[in-house]
Amino acid sequence: MSNKIASQPSCVDPFEEGMISQGEALKRIEARIHPVLACERLPIRECLNRVNNEAVKSPRDVPPQPNSAMDGYAVAIGSLVEGDIAELDDVGTAFAGVPFHGDCGPGQCVRIMTGALIPNGTDAVIMQEQVEIGDDGKIRIDSDHRRGENIRLAGEDVRQGETVIEAGVRLSPADLGVLASLGIAQLQIKRKPVVAFFSTGDELMSVGTPLEPGMIYDSNRYSLHGMLSGLQVDIVDLGVVRDNPQSMLEALVNASAQADLIISTGGVSVGEADYIKPALAELGSTEFWKIAIKPGRPLTFGQISNSIFMGLPGNPVAVMVTFSQFVAPAIEMLSGATLRPPLLFPARSLDRLRKKQGRTEFQRGVATLDENNRWQVGKTGKQGSGILTSMSRANCFIVLPDDNAGVEPGDEVSIQFLDWVH
Ligand code: AMP
Ligand code: MG
């Protein structure tokens, strides 16, 4: 007889039957989520970071008319004298918002301010620093100028009919400015998804009560609340749900009545899944995925009526990793926003990093710029999935792909800055 016990498949195995990649999990999520349909019409100030519902076409040219880019003198290039200095009569002034209404004839010029309409008869603006004013009041200009100089053309920023903001764009401060420049005061935007979340666990106590033996404080609800607060969603905190099928069932029914997305943490490890599975099976469809990432391998994905359910692992670091890699993109899909791939930057590792092949790891790091302005990254101490301080000290994930088998100091790695660290 062997004196060793054959180990069952477990979360310490690098690869296991039925595992899917992160990319495959994201594809499955995308195939199962429908964006919210409802919209609201809001004043553009309230549209910041919200999702634009329909492509915006410009009703006008911006700028609407040609105008001056400089303070100076508007002239006809034909009034200048090749190889010599022309002496022109100053026949008036054009201010921004107060045009010069006369005509500017040959041998004449018009004093002009930035933003003022280009006067009739002129086709260039000469900077005031490039002219001389004679004792007789004549404006002296050499011939070193060209037609169109310092003139902003009508429509050079936006042409009438041009699409300026596509559907599915999250509106930036610049977008709000562009909308205002088109004269658009209100916009149709997608309503915010409602996201409900709860923690599961008989060991959990809420902050504000003394800790009893064998218990721990619930931290996941706070990190989740923090991450959700940075997104454009309405948040419903459903508290702690105890480890029994009845409580779970009630929580899910309650959550699905009010939320587009339900997030739970915990209760998906071996032996605990027993009460989540039947509750979900009773209410809707469920899939249990083993994703080839560390931390955060198990992910439950389900549908309950019109709500999406995402069951995250219980370990505090795994919660934050799976939120950033799966829940945040799922919220973008629900919001009707066009997904943008994560921004990864190359960085030089300062540390030796242990890593098994066959899964993508999200170690926690602190990225800084070296003396050559290139990113370098060190890990934030112990990397266990229960070590939440490894996350609070970090400003980035060190993303080690499936085929990476460990990192030596000086090796290049990819880093992904944490969305919620600025
Ligand atoms: P579970 O998946 O429920 O077995 O949880 C895995 C580990 O994460 C256990 O050590 C739990 O005590 C811990 N954990 C689960 N939920 C929370 C929570 N809300 N806050 C802090 N730790 C938790
Ligand atoms: Mg638990």
Image: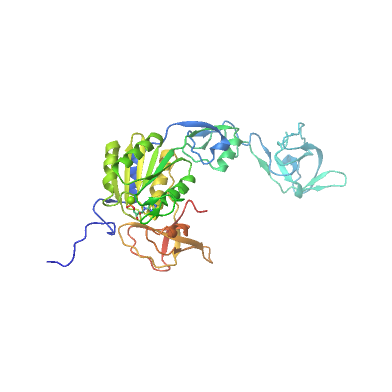
Near-viewer residue (269 or 233): 269
Near-viewer residue (403 or 139): 403
Toward the right, the furthest residue is 136
15 lies left or right of 4: right
Q: Residue 43: in sight, yes or no?
A: yes
Measured as percent of width and height from the top left, residue 352 is found at 39, 68
Measured as percent of width and height from the top left, residue 169 is found at 48, 40
284 lies left or right of 75: left
- How many discs appear? 0
Q: Is residue 399 above or below residue 37?
A: below
Choose top left, top right, bottom left or bottom right for residue 10. bottom left
Measured as percent of width and height from the top left, residue 81 is found at 76, 45
Q: Quadrant of the N terminus?
A: bottom left
Measured as percent of width and height from the top left, residue 36 is found at 42, 35
Choose top left, top right, bottom left or bottom right for residue 253. top left
Near-viewer residue (62 or 137): 62
In this figure, which colouring scheme has been used for the structure? rainbow
Q: Residue 158: in sight, yes or no?
A: no
Near-viewer residue (213 or 35): 213
